[in-house]
Image (spheres, helix red, strand yellow):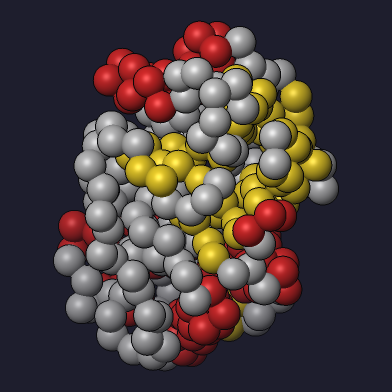
Amino acid sequence: MIAARNGPPMIPFVRDFDFACGRRDQVSSLIQRVVANNPGPFTYAGTSTFIVGRDNPGASVAVIDPGPADEAHLLALLSAVEGRVVSHVLVTHTHRDHSPLAHPFANAVGAPILAAQPPKCQTHASGTLDEDEDDRFQPDTILSGGETIAGDGWTMKALFTPGHASNHMAFALVDEHALFCGDHVMGWSTTVVAPPDGNMSDYIESLDAVIAHDFDVLWPAHGPPIRDPRPFLAAYRTHRLDRERQILDRIRAGDTDISTMVPILYAAVDPRLWPAASLSVRAHLDKLVREGRVRVDAAGRYTAG
């Protein structure tokens, strides 16, 4: 995830995060969180696994995003749900920081795995960003969006949110008007949209769908919750469209390739993050080409449409 700092809008990022890896935290009346020990430039403090349901013996709970293949995290999750019944294992998408532990955990607790259909294309530019595809993953039940998932005192609905990944699924907790938004929206930074699997047109459309639901709180898979989603999402969306305008301005100024645009557009960003920025620019350009506002020739040179 990467945010440029050289222009409006100012996204009201939230970065303060009270956590300890492996610790079970009660973060709402129906939500507990356990953070995996996989911090990094694209995972922030690590992947948050959420447990949804009541903390009563025998109560049924759902577990969202078991996380990376990590034995310590598996043991922490098994301890966190001990005494309760895991009725569903839900996966937002199949990047390696979210889904590899799903099958070991589901097998240990005897629960089915529910997720969107994994992508057919298993080669992703985002693999260079430690967000490679978990190509072994296959859910027991394929979700398409709109399904209801319920347990003891809780109800969730699947909300299809492609863009960051073609199979990205968010989960709305009806009882708290909250959204487990995976990597679709981050509180600490903007989200990478990396072609070929990532798609900026889909991302903007999905973002609009999330905005329309007017959730009270968002629970990203990395970092702290977003407790005032309305202005945050408005700024998040404006940021994307502003970046699109900046890219068009660079093309009109005579830039024809991404490598020329990125040092200018992301001048205030650590150059080590420019590969991620290049993928984001490519996603915007793909969108502009689809819309006929930009042309690209066989050599990969871009001009105004």
Foreground of the two, 141 or 302: 141
- Quadrant placement of the N terminus: bottom left
Q: Specify the farthest residue to the front.
A: 57
The residue lying at 25 percent from left, 64 percent from top is 16
Q: Residue 58: x, y in percent?
A: 60, 21
Count the numbered circles shown.
0
Q: Residue 257: x, y in percent?
A: 41, 68
Foreground of the two, 265 or 269: 269
Whether residue 63 is visible to the viewer of this picture, yes or no, is no
Asked if 15 appears above or below 253 in the picture, the reply is: above
The residue lying at 55 percent from left, 46 percent from top is 30
Q: Residue 205: x, y in percent?
A: 70, 67
Foreground of the two, 159 or 27: 27
Relative to 26, 214 lies left or right:
right
The residue lying at 38 percent from left, 80 percent from top is 12
Relative to 85, 49 lies left or right:
left
The residue lying at 28 percent from left, 32 percent from top is 22
Asked if 92 appears above or below 213 in the picture, the reply is: above
Relative to 244, 275 lies left or right:
left
Asked if 214 appears above or below 80 in the picture, the reply is: below
The quadrant where residue 226 appears: bottom left
Whether residue 55 is visible to the viewer of this picture, yes or no, is yes
The quadrant where residue 53 appears: top right
- Quadrant placement of the C terminus: bottom right
